[in-house]
Image (cartoon, coloured by chain):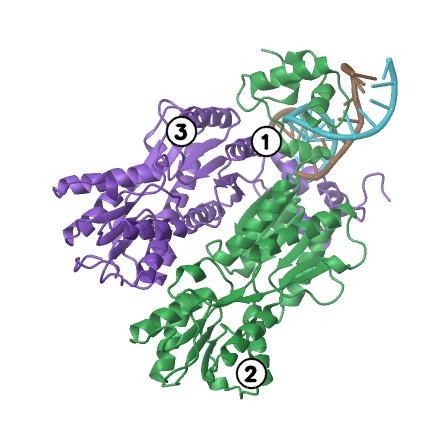
Chain colours: A purple, B green, C cyan, D brown
Amino acid sequence: MSQHKASADSGRATIRDVAERAGVSVASVSRVLSGNYPVSDELRSRVMKVVRELDYVTNAHARSLAGGGTPTVAILINNITGAAFAHIAQGVENAASVRGWLSMVCTTSDDPERELALVNLMRQQGVAAVILLGGAYDVEDYQLRMARFARSLDAAGSRLVLVGRPPLDGDVPATAVDYDNESGAYAMASHLLSAGHRKILILPGHSDFTTAQGRLEGTRRAFAAHGVPFDPGMVNHHGGYSPEYGYQAVQEGLRHKLGFTAVLAGTDVVAAGAMQAVREAGLTVPGDVSIVGYDDIPLASQLFPQLTTVHVPYEEMGRVAVRAVADQRERGGRRKAREGDHVVLGTHVVVRQSVQPPARRP
Amino acid sequence: MSQHKASADSGRATIRDVAERAGVSVASVSRVLSGNYPVSDELRSRVMKVVRELDYVTNAHARSLAGGGTPTVAILINNITGAAFAHIAQGVENAASVRGWLSMVCTTSDDPERELALVNLMRQQGVAAVILLGGAYDVEDYQLRMARFARSLDAAGSRLVLVGRPPLDGDVPATAVDYDNESGAYAMASHLLSAGHRKILILPGHSDFTTAQGRLEGTRRAFAAHGVPFDPGMVNHHGGYSPEYGYQAVQEGLRHKLGFTAVLAGTDVVAAGAMQAVREAGLTVPGDVSIVGYDDIPLASQLFPQLTTVHVPYEEMGRVAVRAVADQRERGGRRKAREGDHVVLGTHVVVRQSVQPPARRP
DNA sequence: TTGAAAGCGCTACCAT
DNA sequence: ATGGTAGCGCTTTCAA
């Protein structure tokens, strides 16, 4: 055994093992492997031969410490199981991997403490970016909390990116990638209104959730634009984005004889629940009741009838988020607030089969 | 400015900044932060005060290099967008985070080269485990390939874990977490057979995919057990686990007048596609055609009628995978092949509304 | 083109 | 209980 950890020792081979065995210096091995420095063909092949023999890979931690290292982006997601989030994550992952970057996914389970812990954990990891996914609760300290995250991360050389939620106020070092939530809702509601619906059951979701707020606001504007009075009694805020919410809200609406001819669901998943309830009541979709969703996840086209909904470019949002970070790094750190610090992507209605002009009242 | 990187310098504060500012040694700061060593209250509070002032977090790379470090598990997944995989990932993430471990998700997009690259990348990262998710193509070099991964990873001190695919042959340092795929299919087919169905359209998916093989085999056994001759002409292998596969297979089956009264789909998603096709042909589910799936993802209960399917404990598989790794590390490395190196979880049929005894022939 | 050596930020061992 | 310091494995000057 040599006086250093022998290669056959426990643990992995080190660059020194490679260097010794190849009879070259550590520096040369490093240069061969990084490939960003001229080396003779002979040296290269000698080193690579040993690398293969030893099945050597560099230690990423050591490399990071010494300056090199693979940029990593961290995705903080409420629940990886939601299709919309999964698509954003996929976009991030793709954009990261084409750049040779790594991505990690961590789930927060809607727990602010865990979110904080994870942000700090990511700060420790020295990630290039922390990407927060999905709508947020617009509670009092939200802005402060995020601003604190942003500065903290910025000081550590990473970037906070908010995807699918509104940008932060003031001069905060963060990037926001958003979609035109309100316009989507406006268009979707208009679609229903144009088809002749007047009594529409509206299920935006919890009223302190940012996406719900935007969707409701868009809906309101559509009613106004069509000169249709907006009846707050037709709005049910009582649930999150689950099938159960849609299911129960429709059951209640039916029980209270709200006389609606259409349901404007906050998400496709909510629409699926609504559809179940309508059917169980012996009514048909869209014959008796039209139903629309929001998100355009795969579920929308797997339902029967296929769901008319608002398309949100989730995957692209993920890609854009990474691109924004990459651009920003190339320009070198922070500087002033910029154009690309807030990008808004478009949404549009996808017409499928779940809407029909109103016939009789249920 | 001090002669070392000042704290106000670019980049993050280091343990030295904290030590200097608190007027203590670097070692003491380390001890306070690790918390695994006795320190006086006074020292602790002095250090923590500065830590808060500087918003200091330790550098995870340096920590890993020096011996400490947060164990990390890497999930390699084909496509994060699949609900089944997402649930496994969720299980992994949960189990990891309760232990204070980190988890990363990387997608392979069904590309063997990318898979290899990622395994090596993870080896560089020194992850505790590389968890490969989902069925695999049972092609010739699969076993060799995986065995190579396993040994390579093992040499670097990490563990290969195969989830949702069969274990490896021979004495390979890997862990497999599997579910009883074949029995699930057996039970599901029996359910249909018991209801009186005889002409069943079978859609297992590509014949070289491990899960498809098991599901088909279970189906065969069920036919045999019920004394029903198995007609290979009723099997359509021509697709992956997508709605399109189910959709097209049913259309073809109808066109060729196969006269089936039930569809045994390879997955819930395939069942959804099948359901669309049946409906578009003007037939009803389950009145004219019964349909069953496999997986029991949320989609299954969002369809109408709600889908009878086989429940697979995906989330638990994820948790079990991490637990197996954790146990193994506590026992200290490899040793002999053990009990826990291959665990098989149970499956069961979930009866919902998509099956009914056959009436007339479509 | 190649080698020697100084760190990167931290932990853990050895003194005190 | 606390401080000094030798590495951990790598990259990157600086010399040769």
Labelled pair 1, 3 in contact (Cβ < 8 Å): no
**Total number of numbered labels?**
3
Q: Are tags 1 and 3 found on a single chain?
A: yes
How many residues crowd mark 2 within 10 Å: few (<14), some (14–19), many (20+)?
Answer: some
Query: In the figure, is residue A76 to the left or right of A195?
Result: right
Q: Identify the amino acid type marked 1.
A: Gln
A308 in relation to A114, above or below: below
Which mark lies nearer to you, 1 or 3?
3
SS at badge 3: loop
**Which residue matches tag 2?**
B223
* Neighbours of disc 3 within 10 Å: few (<14), some (14-19), many (20+): few
Q: x and y percent of residue A231 in the render?
A: 20, 41
Q: Quadrant of the C terminus of chain A?
A: bottom left
- Name the residue: 77% across, 22% down: B38
- The type of residue carrying mark 2 is Phe
State the CA–CA distance, disc 1 to disc 3: 28 Å
- Label 1, residues with CA under 10 Å away: few <14, some 14-19, many ≥20: many
> Helix, strand or loop at disc 2?
helix
* Marks 2/3 same chain: no
Tag 1 subunit: A
Between label 1 and label 2, give the one nearer the viewer. Answer: 2
Label 1 sits on a secondary structure element that is helix
Q: Earlier in the sequence, mark 1 or mark 3?
A: 1
Spatial distance from mark 2 to mark 3, Cα to Cα? 58 Å
> Which residue corresponds to mark 1?
A124
Identify the mark at residue A138; answer none if there is no mark. Answer: none
Left or right side of B4 for A203: left
Q: Nearer the viewer, residue B161 or B294?
A: B294
Which chain is mark 3 on?
A
Q: CA distance from mark 1 to mark 2?
A: 57 Å
| Drawn side of residue B4 relative to residue B244, left or right | right
- Judging by the rendered image, the residue that carries numbered circle 3 is A139
